[in-house]
Amino acid sequence: MPLAVALGDPAGIGPEVIAKSWEERRRHAVPPFFAVGSVSAVRAVWDGPVAVIDDPAEAIAAFEMALPILRVKSDTEVVPGRPDLEGARNSLDALEFAVGLTRAGSSSALVTGPVSKAQLYAIGFVHPGQTEFVAERCGVASELVAMMLMGPSLKVVPVTTHIPLREVSELISVERIVTKGRAAIRGLQRQFGIASPRLAVAGLNPHAGEDGTLGREEIEIIAPAVERLREEGYDAFGPQAPDIMFSAQRRPTYDAALCMYHDQGLIPLKTLHFDEGVNVTLGLPIVRTSPDHGTAFDIAGKGLADPGAMIAAIRTAGECARRLAEA
């Protein structure tokens, strides 16, 4: 069964990196997929073969010779690098369509292209991001899912995501850390085939609080959360000092790092794996991945976009879907 790949904002680099992923299908063993969104957006940045399909079932037969695209009704003319509200509506229509197809079993997994939150908010989008939107459409409370960013040598799960840094200490709690830790461990078991995942839990403060002299969140919140996870039978340990836990010596000692805030995990992940980072949503009834980069409007349509992260996202989605099907 093919994967569904939502194009993202049609004025961004999503159409280009998806088309380039199809071009690289043989060299990188990319599983069959079909794009969902604006046909004109792809044709504006790529002169390769396109097969406009009406049903996901047509994608497998078309995939070898052309990029299959399932057009959405809001298909619009696109100027690469110039986002507008029509393009935002198109990206939202494509996302909703692709989620529905995956939930219905017409695709084996969902891959989402990069969107502009600012453009989506301008048309009334009320979710913090695509992750929360997909969770709602799948009937799962957003606090029960976890966003895992991964590359070849590191997987990170932020406990808090897109919030101001000054609010982090107010929002982390024992229950929140435990909930994200459970979602991370169960996702690693189900989607990545790791029987007993090792979860390293980061501290919040420098040197993990230095026994309370640099902050008490480690003592009062993080350590009790780690103990709760261990009582539930999970291999969790910490709080770890954030300034050393991402070193080459420490990374092999755990399968994923549970981080207290967005940049704590994303800075090391993007430093190590900028062109191949993948976002995996854990805790959903479907497989969902996305490349760990944005719309890059400044280079859209210039042929400069690297498809590495999109290729990794599609391949990861295919591998996770296969494991779930075999479970």
Image: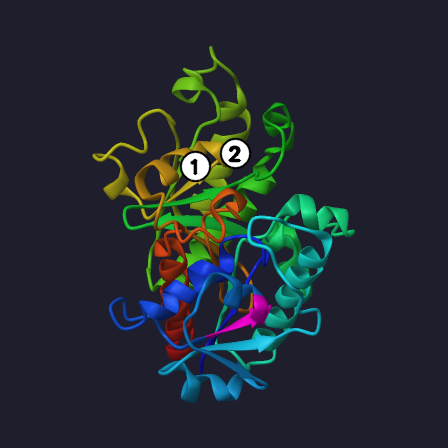
Q: Residue at x 38, y 27 (%)?
A: 242
- Of 271 and 184, which appears nearest the observer? 271
Segment colored magenta: 34-40
In front: 141, or 271? 271
- Badge 2: few (under 14), some or many (20 or more) residues near its Cα, within 10 Å? many
Question: Does 30 appear above or below 252?
Answer: below
**Circle 1 sits on which residue?**
265
Residue 140 in view, yes or no: no
Q: Quadrant of residue 316?
A: bottom left
Q: Is residue 76 left or right of residue 231?
A: right
Q: Residue at x 53, y 76 (%)?
A: 69
Element under disc 2:
loop
Q: Looking at the picture, how far across and down is residue 323, in whole percent?
A: 37, 72
Residue 53: image location, x then y, percent: 55, 84
Residue name at image x 62 percent, y 64 percent: 95
Q: Answer left or right for 297 relative to 89.
A: left
**Residue 116 horizontal/vertical position (percent):** 62, 48
Q: Are marks 2 and 1 in contact (CB under 8 Å)?
A: yes
Q: Quadrant of residue 167?
A: top right
Q: Amino acid at mark 2?
A: Tyr
Residue that numbered label 2 is attached to: 261
The residue that appears at 64% across and 60% down in the rendered structure is 91
Q: Is residue 51 above or below residue 253?
A: below
Q: Residues within 10 Å of mark 1 (few under 14, many from 20)?
A: many
In this image, 192 relative to 125: left or right?
left
- Residue 292 visible in the snapshot: yes
The type of residue carrying mark 1 is Gly
- In the rendered image, which quarter contains the N terminus? bottom left
Measured in 3D between alpha carbons, the distance from the residue under mark 2 to the one under mark 1, in whole angstroms, is 7 Å
